[in-house]
Image: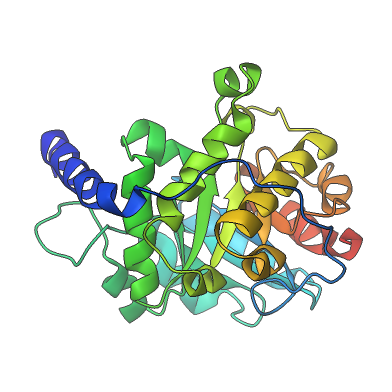
Amino acid sequence: MGVARCAAVRASVARTTVSRREGRSSAQAPAVRRRCVAVNAGTGKFIVGGNWKCNGTAASVKDLVKALNAGKIDADVDVYVAPPFVFIPRVQAELNSEKYAIAAQNCWVSEGGAFTGEVSAEMLVDANIPWVILGHSERRALCGETSEFVGEKVKYALSKGLKVALCIGETLDQRESGKTMDVCYAQLKAVNDVITAADWDNVVIAYEPVWAIGTGKVATPDQAQDVHAGIRKWCASNISPEVASKIRIQYGGSVNASNCDELATKEDIDGFLVGGASLIGDAFVTICNSAKNSK
């Protein structure tokens, strides 16, 4: 679909959500007590996602699947991997489904039709793909997806029975100007304005500081924890305390086999969304098993 038409669709989505957003507060929430028990999205499990992005060949995917199948994954962790669309059938056929679920890297905002290059939520359901990643910073930046557009995509995907990994996060300029939490809250609000509290049971939040994605930079464990705690507080105030106690919040941004253990010890880090390291089988397995260090 042409850039102009994409922009028109996004503008239409934004107009339809204005009335829903009016009157909803995005103010920073008051502090809530630390969780005594992590009852996360109905399972309580640590959750790790592997986003393969636009990488791989038939040969490299075969090798990666072999390495993942050989890895021992702790029973107390949920894992999903998101191959490029063209490799999903191969991965579905060969990857051990008892260890790994399959995710798509994107889906369209509405029912399928004349939207060249897009994949609908209905197609994912029909292909037995249970998860989809939405709101990734690369799509926000490169494809012009606004927070309101992401909100409508999340709403539609959930309505078709998909589970959503919702990505949020700030740029370096936004962090340096002290706007990290304002940016994250606005991105969350755009989704919360169009879905119900019950819908959040099928969402995990992936906090990915844009400045740390693919750069080799990583937020310190304390920096990541501070943002995750703020996200949980916002959820308690703007959705419900119950949702805040259940929602799983992943950290993403140059997570690797060397830094995952310390990050996993933090109270409000419930897992990881992994980019480059998810293409290295043994490294990804190590990251998955950092769940043993979680609180």
Q: Is residue 213 visible?
A: no
Residue drawn at x 63%, y 27% as measured from the top left: 215
Note whether residue 97 is visible.
yes
Q: Give residue 194's position: percent from left, percent from top.
A: 36, 59
Q: Quadrant of the C terminus?
A: bottom right
Q: Is residue 14 left or right of residue 260?
A: left
Q: Quadrant of residue 63?
A: bottom right
Q: How many marks?
A: 0
- The front one of 1 and 203 is 203
Side (left or right) of 9 relative to 288: left
Q: Is residue 48 left or right of residue 104?
A: right
Q: How is the image coloured?
A: rainbow
x, y percentage for residue 268?
Answer: 78, 54
Compared with 24, 62 (above or below) is below
Front residue of 157 and 143: 157
Quarter of the figure with the N terminus: top left
Which of these two is toward me, 238 or 268?
A: 238
Residue 272: percent from left, percent from top: 69, 53
Residue 121 vertical placement versus 191 (above, below): below
